[in-house]
Image (cartoon, rainbow, N blue to C red):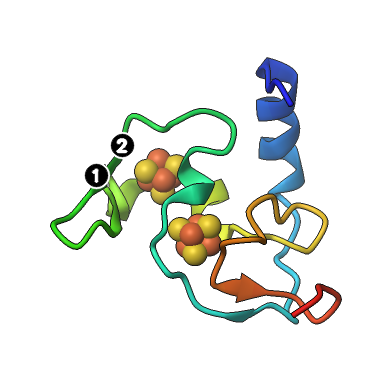
Amino acid sequence: MKYNLFHKVRQLIIYLKPRDKSRYGQCRRCGACCKFMYQCVFLKYDDENKAVCRIEKLKFYTCSKYPLNSKEHHTKNVCGFQFPSEPG
Ligand code: SF4
Ligand code: SF4
């Protein structure tokens, strides 16, 4: 799927919603969510090949809330977070 400006704006609006509280798990720092639309310029990897955000303290609210809910969970095949509705 080719993402464009429409998708980016849509995501900014959707992420104004509160996060689904049923989410569980933790981030594995795989970096997949930092490059599913396009590779973010602030993404780097450490010596253990773990994703690091160069602007960790300032990162966008969409990043901090990802994944917001099951519908917006675009990296569920590799992500350390899950929702009860997703197959285990
Ligand atoms: S700002 Fe940081 S957390 Fe957000 S996509 Fe870029 S590298 Fe990932
Ligand atoms: S896809 Fe999931 S596990 Fe990977 S960096 Fe993003 S939030 Fe963390």
Residue 43: tell me if it is visible.
yes
Position of residue 80 measured from the top left corner of the image (x, y, whole percent): 54, 72
Horizontal side of 52 relative to 63 (left or right) equals left
Relative vertical location of residue 28 with respect to residue 84 in this rendering, above or below: above
Task: Report crowding for label 1: few under 14, some 14 to 19, many 20 or more residues within 10 A (C-alpha).
Answer: few
Distance from disc 2 to disc 1, alpha carbons, whole Å, reads 5 Å
- In the image, the residue with mark 2 has its CB under 8 Å from the nearest atom of ligand 1: yes
Q: Amino acid at mark 2?
A: Phe
Residue 59 visible from this viewpoint: no
What amino acid is found at the position of numbered circle 1 in the picture?
Answer: Arg
Label 1 residue SS = loop
Q: Assess whether mark 1 and mark 2 are in contact (beta carbons under 8 angstroms).
A: yes
Residue at 75% in and 82% down: 22
Question: In terms of depth relative to the viewer, which is nearer, 31 or 9?
Answer: 31
Q: Is residue 31 left or right of residue 47?
A: right
Q: Which residue is mark 1?
A: 54
Q: Quadrant of the C terminus?
A: bottom right
Q: State the residue at coordinates (41%, 33%).
A: 40
Q: Quadrant of residue 43?
A: top left
Residue at horizontal 75 percent and vertical 32 percent from the top: 10
Residue at the disc numbered 2: 42
Q: Residue furthest left?
A: 47
> Does any atom of ligand 1 lie closer than 8 Å to the CB of label 1?
yes
Q: For the N terminus, give its image quadrant.
A: top right
